Image: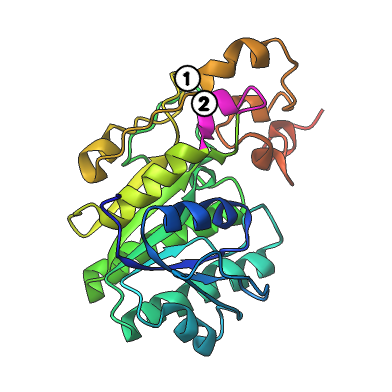
Amino acid sequence: MSEAAGIRVALSGAGGQIGAVLRPRLLDAGIVLRSGGGPTALTPLSEAETVTTGDLRDPEAVDRLLEGAEVLVHMAGTSVERPMPEVIENNLVALQAVYEGARRHAVRRVIFASSNHAFGMHSVNDRLDIDAPFRPDGAYGLSKAWGELMGQMYWDRHGIEGVAIRIGSALPRPTEFRHLSTWLGHDDLTQLVLRSIAAPIPGYVAVWGASNNPRSYWDNSAAAAAIGYRPTQSAEDWAEEILGQENPLDPVARTLQGGSFTTIDYTPQDQRPGRAKG
């Protein structure tokens, strides 16, 4: 039985791609789960799961989700690059409402779905440790940098523990060249979340959400030290197949860790202010 067994956990974004993976796995680990599907009506998977609905910008919806919870696994929000007004509503306004709900309900820990895209403008030649500076590759990545800082603030000001998981490419298997560096397998995702729920932590920590990939952009040794995360999956198992395929990224995106997100509405170097015009 998992160390997390018996812990009362709220899962936001339970109807999303990652939430759908986590729900049955958290229940299998013995967690008493309260799953929020946003506007989507969910059907409980077992007697150990309660489901709620509602927009997390609404304090009443937050209260329904967090009632009786010890830990919140916050996976809700916009998860791709979108116009700034949408990102602000779903990833800033809703997140602040969730943290205020955590204060009201004395939730002791919030596990925040951060993203590698908060660091996406770093070169693929860089290997980042956990203290690397934010270099977001768009509005989505910018919101995740803001969310990490919110988690730190709520620990410093209110004593709510926090784990920010900088999720890479959470997929059943890697399918393209970039994934050799960024893949997070579902088994490792589950281990990472369970360790984030149960491990003793010194207040607030951040970890890279990646499997044991030899080509990784990130040094995740701090995750082993902080929460005991030791990934068992590796994108390298698919390397021969993937390296035989064409890299789908454009030439600029191939040079930056955020991949295709980095060149959405991107200004080429020769068109930037102060550049000589031919």
67 over 258 or under it: above or below:
below
Q: Which percent across, then down, holds residue 8?
A: 34, 70
Which residue occupies 36% across, 58% down? 30
Question: How many discs appear?
Answer: 2
Per the rendered image, the range of residues in magenta is 174-185
What residue did someone put label 2 on? 181
Which residue occupies 66% across, 64% down? 84
Q: Which percent across, then down, holds residue 190?
A: 43, 46
Which residue occupies 35% across, 51% down? 194
116 over 86 or under it: above or below:
above
Residue 142 left/right relative to 194 = right
- Confirm whether residue 277 shows in the render: yes
Q: Which percent across, then down, holds residue 204?
A: 26, 57
Q: Residue furthest bottom?
A: 60
67 over 129 or under it: above or below:
below
71 over 269 or under it: above or below:
below
- Confirm whether residue 123 shows in the render: no
- The amino acid pointed to by label 1 is Arg
Q: In front here: 159 or 20?
A: 20
Whether tag 2 and tag 1 are in contact, CB under 8 A, the answer is yes
Q: In front here: 233 or 131?
A: 233
- Secondary element type, mark 2: helix
- The amino acid pointed to by label 2 is Ser
What residue did someone put label 1 on? 215
Q: Is tag 2's residue or tag 1's residue first in the polypeptide sequence?
A: 2
Q: Quadrant of residue 4?
A: bottom left
